[in-house]
């Protein structure tokens, strides 16, 4: 994406002068603003006093495979519905409330197009689940694979952080006991006219074979937990051995998460859904055997969303095109050096989205 500053440099012009010229003369923004075209899709809910900004509605990009996601910039959250194959924005609204989004979608997207949608991918937000069900009833709802795997690995990382916190607390309590013992022994030594050294009451830190303390092992194991065993380097292999020797239950949790990652691989697309469903149920039952709140919460989440997780294996749709839209928005903000005039930003975004380059 070429910025105006790049063009100004080539032309030997002032960046600010070219930007003002483009905004007020070349772009057509002033004419669109005067005709109020940039506000024509704004939506006013029943009983509300203010309108909800809807800067983009482009039905030319409508398809049968859709993605819904949120985007945050300038302190505001937006809902973006895009074409899952082309990555083009179909609708963008400054709201993430289910009732408002449903009302906006139903107003701007004809019912025949909504009924024709066959797939919609999304994250685990309850609001978007409601929008998908109410506005696109015929579409197969698919929970985005990236978000599901993130839940799984986040749970594993939460357990690691929990173990680290518990270790730090144990170390602190042990040192407190030594401090109390020192005060007792110091008073006794004072009566006997003898001296004791506080150094003798300092908790000894265990240094493992690789030079790490237990706290460091837990801290530095973050990245290796995202990898399979054969992907570890020598340092990660040593650290993993120490980690799992210290916490055998954590090893079983790690193995369980990697089993899920393998089960969720793209080479399983098209497999028998009933078999995949039974495998997922068995895996959830395995998680419930761990006596850990984070892992048990993960099991409950997976069970609640199991139907939409299984739908991934029908054709392998994900929310990747929606994430591409987010990246393009960041690039536009970057080359614009931030956002000063929101209406102008919406105008430029709409023009770029309508072109073939977005």
Image: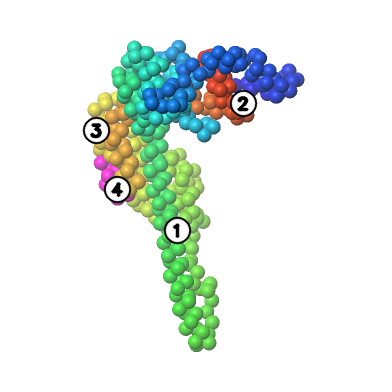
Could you tell which of marks 3 and 4 lies nearer the N-terminus?
A: 3
Q: Is residue 331 visible?
A: no
Query: Which residue occupies 45% across, 71% down?
Result: 178
Q: Is residue 32 left or right of residue 259?
A: right
Q: CA distance from mark 2 to mark 4?
A: 50 Å
Picture coordinates of residue 79, whole percent (x, y): 44, 26
Q: CA distance from mark 3 to mark 4?
A: 20 Å
Q: Nearer the viewer, residue 295 or 91?
A: 91
Q: Nearer the viewer, mark 2 or mark 1?
A: 2
Residue topped by disc 4: 290
In terms of image quadrants, where is residue 16?
top right
Residue topped by disc 1: 168
Q: Is residue 223 left or right of residue 279?
A: right
Residue topped by disc 2: 336
Query: Which residue occupies 45% across, 43% down?
Result: 224
Give the vertical position of 106 relative to 331 (above or below): above
Residue topped by disc 3: 278
Q: CA distance from mark 2 to mark 1?
A: 46 Å
Q: Quadrant of the N terminus?
A: top right
């Amino acid at each position: 994406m070429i910025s105006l500053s790049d063009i100004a440099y080539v032309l030997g012009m002032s960046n600010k002068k070219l930007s003002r010229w483009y905004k007020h003369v070349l772009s057509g923004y002033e004419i669109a603003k005067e005709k109020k075209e940039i506000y024509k899709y704004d939506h006013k809910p029943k009983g509300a006093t203010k309108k909800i900004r809807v800067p983009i509605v482009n039905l030319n990009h409508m398809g049968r495979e859709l993605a819904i996601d949120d985007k945050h910039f300038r302190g505001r959250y937006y809902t973006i519905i895009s074409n899952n194959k082309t990555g083009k924005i179909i609708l963008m609204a400054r709201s993430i409330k289910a009732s408002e989004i449903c009302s906006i979608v139903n107003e701007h997207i004809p019912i025949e197009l909504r009924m024709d949608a066959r797939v919609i991918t999304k994250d685990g937000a309850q609001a978007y689940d409601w929008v998908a069900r109410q506005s696109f009833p015929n579409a197969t709802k698919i929970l985005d694979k990236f978000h599901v795997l993130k839940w799984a690995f986040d749970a594993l990382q939460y357990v690691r952080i929990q173990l680290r916190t518990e270790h730090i607390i144990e170390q602190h309590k042990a040192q407190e006991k030594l401090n109390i013992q020192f005060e007792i022994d110091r008073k006794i030594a004072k009566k006997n006219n003898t001296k004791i050294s506080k150094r003798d009451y300092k908790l000894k830190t265990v240094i493992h074979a690789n030079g790490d303390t237990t706290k460091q092992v837990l801290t530095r194991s973050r990245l290796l937990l995202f990898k399979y065993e054969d992907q570890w380097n020598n340092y990660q292999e040593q650290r993993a051995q120490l980690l799992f020797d210290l916490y055998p239950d954590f090893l079983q949790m790690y193995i369980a998460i990697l089993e899920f990652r393998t089960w969720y691989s793209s080479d399983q697309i098209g497999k028998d859904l009933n078999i995949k469903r039974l495998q997922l149920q068995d895996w959830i039952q395995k998680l419930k055997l761990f006596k850990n709140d984070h892992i048990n919460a993960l099991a409950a989440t997976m069970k609640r969303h199991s139907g939409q997780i299984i739908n991934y294996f029908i054709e392998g749709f994900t929310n990747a095109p929606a994430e591409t839209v987010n990246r393009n928005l960041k690039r536009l903000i970057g080359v614009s050096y931030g956002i000063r005039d929101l209406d102008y930003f919406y105008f430029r975004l709409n023009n770029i989205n309508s072109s073939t380059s977005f």
